[in-house]
Amino acid sequence: MFFSVIVPVFKVHAYLKACIESVLNQSFTDWELILTDDGSPDACPQICDDYAAKDPRIRVIHKENGGLVSARQAGIRLASGDYVMHLDGDDALMPQALANAYRIIEKTKAELVSFSYVRSMGGVLSDRFDEPIEEGLYDKAAMVQSMYPKLLLDASMRHMHYFLCGKAIKRELAVKAQLAVPTSVLLGEDVCCTLPCYLQAEKVYISHTAAYIYTVREDSMTTGCFAGQLTQLETVVETLRRMDCSAVTDFNEQLLRYFCFMCFAIIAAAAENGRYDELPHMKRILSRSVYGMMLIEASFADITFKSRIAVRLIQKNHIAAAFRFLSLCTSVKQMMHKKG
């Protein structure tokens, strides 16, 4: 078995069939599909069982709800493929995803292959999103020079794709990284897996071919607890700090920038969705001294005007001003879109 495709399943019944079909329709056929039903209360468990009854390559795990980390851990424990690919239950693979990964691995012996992705909004695919470095094979020396400075975030806010999906990873690397992530990590679980994989790999291939389709769901954009996400940031930062990242010479600086960037991204998402109700909670969380020191110590260069203003306001603990500024930016963008 060459590939194990692992899909955590929870409340994605409207998307799950398309997700599974995208694996069944792969031109490369030497794979197993592991569906981990994380106690989903909808039709997902039956959908999983129905597909498993039709194709012996599909295996199903039914478990009590424990969150994304525990679902992926359950799946990877069962995996038997040489390489692992993660796929979220509301997303899909491009038809040639596994074939392209196999071709690259056979040619280069890369332990990790990272592909580009496209977004799907209402069934319409967006432009391709590439990694921020050139396509090609990277040995350890090239990784240290070109990849390591962007593992979390460089001074210009460029970073390697955080998400675990869209990557083919040698199973030994993936298992070790995945099982080391605490189940308490509810935000940033992907980067807690990808970062140690990059550090342990001797060869990595970056492909600018799209292999992954990320579905933008309107129903998930307005229901998130943004203040809760800010609280969860502390857990992921502490998890990253405990890793042996000594090979990354500026890791501490990257970690500070990552924290500040994530605060900025969460506040921007709340502002974009008009969540003024969350503003007092976000202000209270970010007023904590440990958060304040990390924000102040993060340094950036060559970032956009919008990012520079928002980050500066956040660093000075002017959270309400940053929120309103980002909300205004969203309104202007929407107006320009309508005029266009």
Image (tube, rainbow, N blue to C red):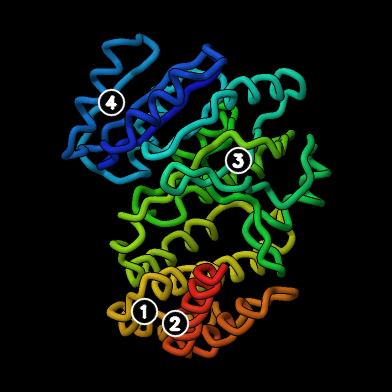
SS of the residue at dot 4?
strand
Residue 290 seen in render: no
SS of the residue at dot 2?
helix
Mark nearer the N terminus (1 vs 4): 4
- Which amino acid, by three-letter code, is at mark 3? Cys
Circle 4 residues within 10 Å: few <14, some 14–19, many ≥20: some
Foreground pick, 235 / 166: 166
SS of the residue at dot 1?
helix
Can you give x and y, in whole percent of width and height, for residue 66 in the image?
26, 44
Mark nearer the N terminus (2 vs 3): 3
Q: Is residue 271 above or below residue 211?
A: below
Mark nearer the N terminus (4 vs 3): 4
**Nearest to viewer (mark 2 / mark 3):** 2
Give the residue number, with chain letter if any, for mark 4: 61
Marks 1 and 2: in contact by CB < 8 Å? Answer: yes
Can you give x and y, in whole percent of width and height, for residue 326 in the image?
49, 79
Circle 2 residues within 10 Å: few <14, some 14–19, many ≥20: many
Q: Residue at x 57, y 33 (%)?
A: 173
Give the residue number, with chain letter if any, for mark 3: 197
The outermost residue toward the front is 339
Give the residue number, with chain letter if any, for mark 2: 323
Quadrant the C terminus occupies = bottom right
